[in-house]
Image (tube, rainbow, N blue to C red):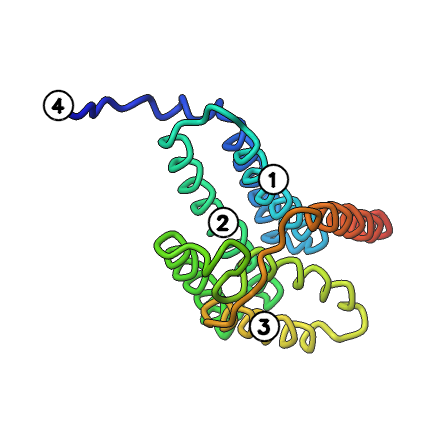
Amino acid sequence: MKDNKQVSVVSFIKDLPNICSLLGLLSAVIGIYFAIQGNFQAALIGVLWAVLFDWYDGIIARKMKGRTKVQGVFGAELDSMIDIVSFGILPAIILLRYGNYNIWFLPGAFVIIAASAIRLTYFNVYGLIDSKTYKGFPLDNNVLILALVFLFEGFFTHSTFSIIIYTLLMLLSVLNLSSIPTPKFKGKWVYALVAYVLVMTSIFGWMLWRQM
């Protein structure tokens, strides 16, 4: 007879990759908090660290020995649930707040979250095209680009820049759902990501310090 015994929910919390995933969720929640306040530099720092933890949970999971199949499945599902918060809800809130919650920004927020949900569901069903290739543009790349674009915010008026990020996020949402093959960055690319996150954190942190 098949063993249907279920372990406790909280037993998965002590799994190291899941702890890393939850640190990513914490970063995203902090980002959401600051986005709602209109502190976009702090919000972007939060989402950048969410990307970093998102990369590292998979790295840790692959290096760990003795993880059960159930732990692997649970970790993958947890990662996907957190991704919708980090790379769907958080960017949508940044867009809404930057647009001063104008009703015209609401469709854009919906598109971002809907595209994220559809892409993550598709990935959960079909996975990669092959071991090195995604179908469509990965969600975490959206916020890496968004953070970079925000460095040029000071060159534009608030209304103009709101249109720029609105257009950018809609374009990225289309690319997320496209069938364009996109290389999967792995291996030594993680060092490039760490450097990027640290540099961008330093820049945005300096901007925040100047505003004090």
For disc 4, the marked residue is 1
In this rendering, the label closer to the viewer, 1 or 3:
1
The reply to whether the C-beta atoms of the residues labelled 1 and 3 are less than 8 Å apart is: no
Q: Considering depth in this image, is 85 or 174 the residue closer to the camera?
A: 174
Query: How far is mark 1 from mark 4, CA to CA?
Result: 38 Å
* Residue 56 - label: 1
Query: How far is mark 2 from mark 1, CA to CA?
Result: 13 Å
Residue 128: % across, % down: 46, 57
Image check: 66 left or right of 205? left
Q: Eyeballing the image, is 187 above or below 101?
A: above
Q: Eyeballing the image, is 2 above or below 42?
A: above
If you read the primary sequence from the N terminus, does the residue marked by circle 4 or circle 2 appear first? 4
Query: How far is mark 1 from mark 3, CA to CA?
Result: 29 Å
Q: Amino acid at mark 1?
A: Tyr
Q: Amino acid at mark 3?
A: Tyr
Q: Amino acid at mark 2?
A: Asp
If you read the primary sequence from the N terminus, does the residue marked by circle 1 or circle 3 appear first? 1
* Residue 142 - label: none
Could you tell me which residue is drawn at 61 percent across and 72 percent down?
168
For disc 2, the marked residue is 83
For disc 3, the marked residue is 166
Mark 1 residue element = helix
Q: Considering depth in this image, is 3 or 196 the residue closer to the camera?
A: 3
Decide: few, some or many residues near mark 4? Use Cα within 10 Å; few <14, some 14-19, many ≥20. few
